[in-house]
Image (tube, rainbow, N blue to C red):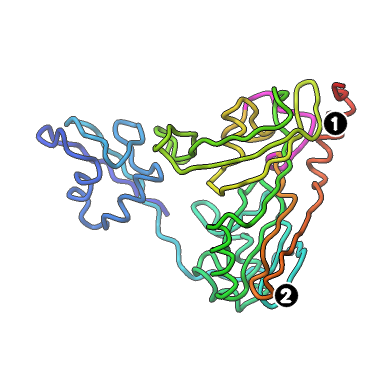
Amino acid sequence: MTSRLTLSVAADAGGRRLDRWLADSVPDLSRARLQALIESGHVRVDGAARKAAYRLGGGERVEVEIPSLPSDTLTPEPITLSIVFEDDHVIVIDKPAGLVVHPGAGNMHGTLAAAVVAHAPSIAAVGSPRRPGIVHRLDKGTSGLLVLAKTQAAYDSLTAQLVARTVSRRYVAVVHGRLRSPEGVIDVPIGRHPYDRVRMAVRPRGGGKRAVTRYRELERFSLHTCVEAVLETGRTHQIRVHLASIGHPVVGDPVYGRRGDVSDVTLDGVALHAAALAFMHPVTQKRVEFAAPVPPRIERLLRHLRESDAPAR
C-alpha cells in the first residue's frame, strides 16, 4: 500500500532546504525515512523530483508518496534454482533473467532470496533479514552467476573481497553499434541521475562513486557488437550505464537503451549475462572459478544477427 500527501509551501518558507522543510511538515516520519523517500524519487516539487538540498522558493506544491515499509520476515518459497556449486559455506547460482534477487518495491514475492531460504533455511540468519546471504546482486533482467554466503563468516569474507576488488566478474553483452576500438576502459563515476532519482547516470568527478569497466569485442556485426565486460567496481547498473555512456547501450535495456531493438527476438530481459565468477573460498582460501554458458535467450539473438546480418570481416 502507498499513501500520498500533497503539501503547499508557504511563501515565507522560501529559501529553506527541501529535506528540512519536509521534516517540519511531516513530523510523523523520521528524518531518515524522509531522506530515503527523497533519494528514491518519491518526493516531487511541482511535479519534479528534487534533491534533499533543493532550495524552495515558496508557493510550490509538494507531493510525497509513502510506500508501506515491507516486513522483515522473508517467507521461504520453493522456486527451482540452477545451482552451479554448493558446500557448507557458499552457494553459487546461475540466475535466470526475470528473477528478482531480493524483495523490493513492487517485487515482494517470487525472489531468489526467498528461494534460497527455502533451499537452505539456515541462510536466513546470515546478513540482513531481507537479503539473506546476499553479498552482491544482478538486475532483474540480467542473467548469470552470483554467490551467496551460507554462514556469517563466509558473508564477512566475501564482503571484504568485494571491497578489496579481488572478486572477478566477467559479463557477456550484446550492444548497439560497432565499437571504435576493439577494447577499452571506462573510468567515470556513477551516481543517481540528477533529475530522475530511480535511474543511475555517469557523473562529473566528485559527483558520484568511482566506477571502472573494462571491455573488449568478442564478435562484430554491422549494427551490433557482442562484447565482454569485466567489472573492477560494482556500482548499481554499472555495465548498462557505462556502455550507454559511450554510445553502445545494451540491447533490450528499457532504461538506458534505445528504441529499435532487435524485435524479431524475444530476450525476456536485457542482453547481459554474468558468464564467469571467481573469488577466494572463505574457508579453504583457494581461488575458485565458475562459468555459466550464454543462455538460450542471448544465443537466439546472436544466431539471428549471424543469419540476418553477417559479421563484418
Q: Is residue 138 left or right of residue 108?
A: right
At x 55% / y 54%, what residue is drawn?
107
Q: Is residue 157 magenta?
A: no
Q: Nearer the viewer, residue 52 or 263?
A: 52
Badge 2 amino acid: Asp
Q: Quadrant of the C terminus?
A: top right
Residue 80 vertical position relative to residue 67 in the rendered view, above or below? below
Q: Residue 221: image x %, image y %? A: 81, 25
Q: Can you say which quadrant of the picture contains the N terminus? A: bottom left
Say which residue appears at 44% left-offset and 35% top-offset.
193
Label 2: which residue?
87
Q: Is residue 106 above or below residue 109?
A: above
The magenta stretch is 258-270
Contact (Cβ within 8 Å) of mark 1 with mark 2: no
Q: Secondary structure at mark 1?
A: helix
Residue 98 vs residue 184, the one in the foreground: 184
| Residue under label 1 | 304
Q: Amino acid at mark 1?
A: His
Q: Position of residue 94 (x, y in %)?
A: 73, 57
Q: In percent of the image, x 55 and y 75: which residue is there?
A: 152
Q: How busy is the neighbourhood of tag 2: few (under 14 within 10 Å), some, or many (20 plus)?
A: few
